[in-house]
Each structure stands twice: as C-alpha cells, then as structure tokens.
C-alpha cells in the first residue's frame, strides 16, 4: 500500500479509501436506491480484507443507511481505532425537523456527537461538510468546526461537492479569521468526467488541499461491463444510478455523451495491452493526474484487491493521451442542496 499526506496536514492516509456508503440496510439508504447495500457480515468481509491490504482510510457519513454505516465501521474498528483514519460527514437532513439539517452550529454540534457515539470513538480524524449550506453563513460553520478541533472531538476538517468559488471563499475566510482550513475536498472525477481539471484541481494543488475522488470508475462504466459493440448499453441489471429514468447525474455524465463509448473502448484496449484490468488503468490514470486518494465504494473484497493493484500500474504519456483524446467538455456536475423548510 502507498501512503500520502492528506493536503497540507501531516496525516498519512492510504491512497485507496474504503467508501462505506455500501454498508448498512437498503431500506434505510437515502442515496439512489439501495440494491448495492450489504449488511454487517458482508461489510466485515470487505473491511477485513481492506485492513489486510494496508488500507487505513475509511470514509462514511451520518446519513448513510441512517447512521448504520457508521455503526458497522465503529464495530469493526474496535481494537484498531488508533491505526485507522476515520472520515465522516454532516449536512443532509436526519429528520423533518427544521434544525435537523444543514451546517448551523446547532446541527453540527448535535451530529458530531451522534457520529462519535455510532462510531464508538472519542474523536473523528476528518469531519467533512457534505454539501455547501446556502442558508448558514460559512463563518458560523467554520467557527463551529474550529471549536470542535480545539475540543479534540475532530482532528481535521474537509469539504465535499461544492463549486470552486465556495471552497475558495471558505479557504480565505479561514485564513483571514484564523479558523481551521479545509484539509481536503472530494468530488467526482474520472476519465469520463474531467471538468474538475478546469478550476477545482488547480486550486487544490495551489493551496495544498487534498483532492479525494469519488466515483473513480464512473459508477462502473469504466470497468467495461456495459460496453457492447461500440456502444454503452445499460440493461436491467445495471445500477439504478446509471439508468435514465432513475439516475441522478450519472447517466447524463457517464453514459449519454456519444464519445464516452470510445473512451471506454480505449481503456479496455490499453488494459489488455498491459495485462491488467480496465479498473486498474482507470485508477492509475487518476493517480497520474495527481489526485490524493480514490474512494472505492464496494460490497466485494475482490474489488478492493483490484483497486490496490492499480498502484503498481504505470502509464506512458502516449497511453494517457490516447485515452484522453476523445473527451469533450460537459456541464459541470453540481449536486444541489436539499431544500429546507426554513424561511
């Protein structure tokens, strides 16, 4: 396993991160259905294999399976806690009550303690804002997170899924007022969606903000399993997130663009030539582009083994150019905030 500093911090994390959204109960999952969710027994198989592979970084959220994901991770880490880096998140509604959502001081203070209880720990390594809160001043959010760091309840703070101007605003307000600065951010980024190369990745590099990638294989499109006869074919067995009638942004970003089938074909060809898998080529490309970590959300241990193998794959400049060449610009993905009931 390779380890790297997370952003400007001295914290060392594995380059492969276990995304824990797939652990819990499909009946309690708020994101994109739940057919890919596994229970405690299967989750432990994945987590045990991750630990054996040297993965020390685990990413979850308070709303994944209504907190059950955090509970499963907390149970697994008993006796291992000091060797692990635990990341969780706050923002989305946890009830219909008006203050059970967003990034207000009230909501954050309640949710951090609930997460600590479920994770069975007295501190969180990386506490991330899951989205930008348009109703709460960022100063309130940053001051609250800073106090939590000073209290020892969290070690570092991070961000997720926001516009670059929002990340920049938070960064410079924190610098000016002496608040904790974000150590990292995470957004979708892969060979089929490269819009983050315009501003987000350069900003992160310029200010030493760790860049964590989710959806590194484009919800499985870059595995090649949906490539048939020169086209991307989404059948009934495909994840709901990739279907036009149920998918959110994934179908429009990863399946619909006509050039994406050619990109997938070139990834498959490159992988075959190198004697590795399309997943390993796709992840190797990400690391070549300078990302800090890739978040692998999976319900199968063998997927983690495959991902770890990508760290040994070296791509030439010609191979990278060949796979990137068909790409065409797309609208910037932005997942809007959940509407609130507050006036």
Image: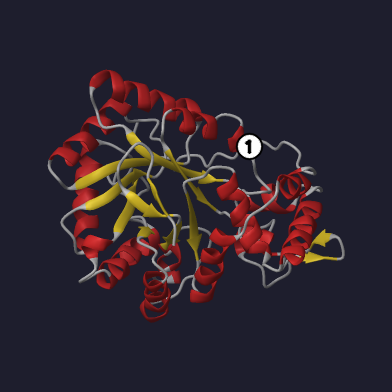
Res. 69 visible in picture: yes
For the residue pair 227 and 292, the one nearer the viewer reads as: 292
Q: Is residue 277 left or right of residue 72?
A: right
The residue located at (30%, 43%) in the rendering is 10
In the orientation shown, which residue stands out farthest toward the right?
Answer: 229
In the orientation shown, which residue stands out farthest toward the bottom?
Answer: 41
Q: Is residue 81 left or right of residue 296?
A: left
In the orientation shown, which residue stands out farthest toward the top?
Answer: 176
Q: Residue 330 at x, y = what percent?
A: 70, 38
Q: Is residue 71 left or right of residue 334?
A: left
Q: Residue 301 at x, y = what percent?
A: 48, 75
Residue that carries the numbered disc 1 in the rendered image:
195
For the residue pair 52 and 201, the one nearer the viewer reads as: 52
Q: Crowding at label 1, few (<14), some or many (≥20) Cα neighbours within 10 Å? A: some
Q: Residue 36 at x, y = what percent?
A: 52, 70
Report which quarter residue 325 is drawn in: top right
The residue located at (60%, 35%) in the rendering is 197
The residue located at (48%, 25%) in the rendering is 165
Report which quarter residue 223 is drawn in: bottom right
Res. 94 visible in picture: no
Q: Quadrant of the C terminus?
A: top left
């Amino acid at each position: 396993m390779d380890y790297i500093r997370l952003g400007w911090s001295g914290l060392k994390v594995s380059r492969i991160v276990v995304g824990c959204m797939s652990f819990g109960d499909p009946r309690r999952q708020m994101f994109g259905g739940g057919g890919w969710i596994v229970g405690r027994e299967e989750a432990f198989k994945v987590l045990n294999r991750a630990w054996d592979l040297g993965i020390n970084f685990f990413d979850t959220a308070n709303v994944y399976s209504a907190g059950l994901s955090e509970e499963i991770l907390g149970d697994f880490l008993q006796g291992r806690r000091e060797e692990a880096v635990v990341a969780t998140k706050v923002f989305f509604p946890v009830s219909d009550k008006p203050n059970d959502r967003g990034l207000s001081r009230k909501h954050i203070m309640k949710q951090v303690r609930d997460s600590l209880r479920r994770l069975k720990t007295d501190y969180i390594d990386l506490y991330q804002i899951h989205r930008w809160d348009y109703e709460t001043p960022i100063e309130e959010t940053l001051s609250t997170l800073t106090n939590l760091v000073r209290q020892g309840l969290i070690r570092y703070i991070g961000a997720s899924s926001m516009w670059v101007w929002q990340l920049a605003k938070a960064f410079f307000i924190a610098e000016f007022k002496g608040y904790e600065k974000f150590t990292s951010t995470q957004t979708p980024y892969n060979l089929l969606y490269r819009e983050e190369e315009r501003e987000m990745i350069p900003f992160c590099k310029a200010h030493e903000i760790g860049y964590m990638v989710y959806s590194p294989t484009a919800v499985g499109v870059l595995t090649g399993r949906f490539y048939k006869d020169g086209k991307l074919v989404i059948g009934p067995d495909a994840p709901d997130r990739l279907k036009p009638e149920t998918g959110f942004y994934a179908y429009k970003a990863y399946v619909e663009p006509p050039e994406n089938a050619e990109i997938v074909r070139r990834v498959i060809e490159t992988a075959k030539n190198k004697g590795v898998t399309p997943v390993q080529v796709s992840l190797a490309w990400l690391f070549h582009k300078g990302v800090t970590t890739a978040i692998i959300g999976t319900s199968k241990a063998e997927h983690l083994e495959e991902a770890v193998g990508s760290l040994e794959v070296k791509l030439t400049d010609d191979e990278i150019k060949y796979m990137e060449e068909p790409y065409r610009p797309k609208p910037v993905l932005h997942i809007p905030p959940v509407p609130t009931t507050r006036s």
